[in-house]
Image (spheres, rainbow, N blue to C red):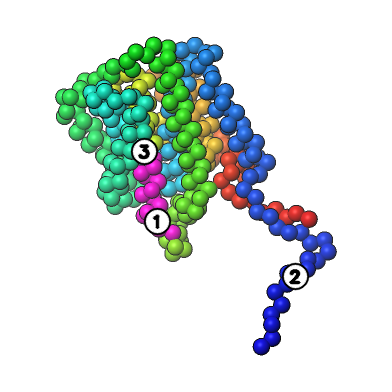
Amino acid sequence: MTAVDQSPTPSLPGATEPRIRRFTPASTLGTSGFLVAVMVLAVLPYYVALSASRELTNLFIYVILATSWNLLAGYGGMVSIGQQAYIGIGAYSLVALAGIMGLNQLLVIPIAAVIGALVALPVSYLVFRLAGGYFAVGTWVIAEVARLVTIRFPELGGGAGISIPPMQDVDRDVRIAIGYWAALVVAVVVVAAVVFLVRSRVGLGLTAVRDEPVAASTSGVDVVASKRLVFVIAAAAAGAAGALVAISTLNVQPNSVFSVQWSAYMIFIVVIGGIGSIEGPIIGAVIFWALQALLADLGEFYLIGLGVIGIVMVLVAPQGVWGLVSRRRRVHLFPIGYRLERRP
């Protein structure tokens, strides 16, 4: 038997060796800018008024909700208009665990996320029997059922809602700052979790499921398991956001926390920013937050203005603001893909 020569094949003169890179110049700059922005935001309460800290807390909540809804619809292909169910569950988890049982409010935030995920798991077995518009309406029905069940408990305030006592022995200014930092931490964790999920094998499978479920299934992707994972993660993020809303307002009303308006906000933010991207929901949340500050005094014309802006964006730029920015070149500010380069 002749021995096989396993020595490496010599390279041809002038040939280039391919190299796979995770970080690109754009993603390096984007990730660095994101970290710098987080550090600046972390010290901002020391330099701005309390009203500004409250408004920025709302911005972080919008980022959490929009990022999770974009994961659900933009990557999982599931358009839900019932995420307010988990916002309400998170808010009432804070009412029950902090307001009634006396647990620390900050400790309840991750617990509210877990409760939202645990509720979403059996719910997924119901709504996954539906598709398309039926799925969207089904999630809305689940949210309404959650609201109707909640108001049946007088211990939770019934239909009138309930107030939450503030943190004991904590100054009002410090309490507002703590709520701000908690919202910032949750927003960073949610964005980072989505980045790591999208760049993993699960994220690649999700993209395939979104584009063509049948082809993804035949390629070995567990379509149902991938969708269920996304559904549960989005519910956990919404649950944490609901707890943050309750901490910020110290008052929980069922018609508010279970309102479909929350889903309308999420859809608007993601459509404006750009669906199916990490950057889009963040940009959309900033735009929506700024529009709220500019148009809130217009009363009913505020909602009309938002509707007009949404329609114009859908017609002119279906991929959103980030789609316009990265239309010519596929730019990613976060390292979610691979880039093949040749080096001498």
Task: Label 1: state its secondary structure.
Answer: helix
Q: Residue at x 50, y 38 (%)?
A: 192
Residue 211 seen in render? no
Q: Where's the C terminus, which quadrant?
A: bottom right
Q: Distance between the residues labelled 1 and 2?
A: 42 Å
Say what amino acid the circle numbered 1 marks: Val
Which corner quadrant of the image does residue 325 belong to?
top right
Q: Tag on residue 306?
A: none
How many residues crowd mark 3 within 10 Å: few (<14), some (14–19), many (20+)?
Answer: many
Say whether disc 3 or disc 2 marks the residue closer to the N-terminus: 2
Say what amino acid the circle numbered 3 marks: Ala
Q: Tag on residue 236?
A: 3
Say what amino acid the circle numbered 2 marks: Thr
Residue 187 seen in render? yes
Boundaries of the magenta span = 221-234
What residue would you read off at disc 1? 223
Image x and y of residue 159, in percent:
20, 24
Magenta-highlighted stretch: main secondary structure?
helix
Q: Above or below — where is 290 with respect to 282?
A: above
Task: Label 3: state its secondary structure.
Answer: helix
Q: Which residue is drawn at 82% across and 61% down?
A: 14
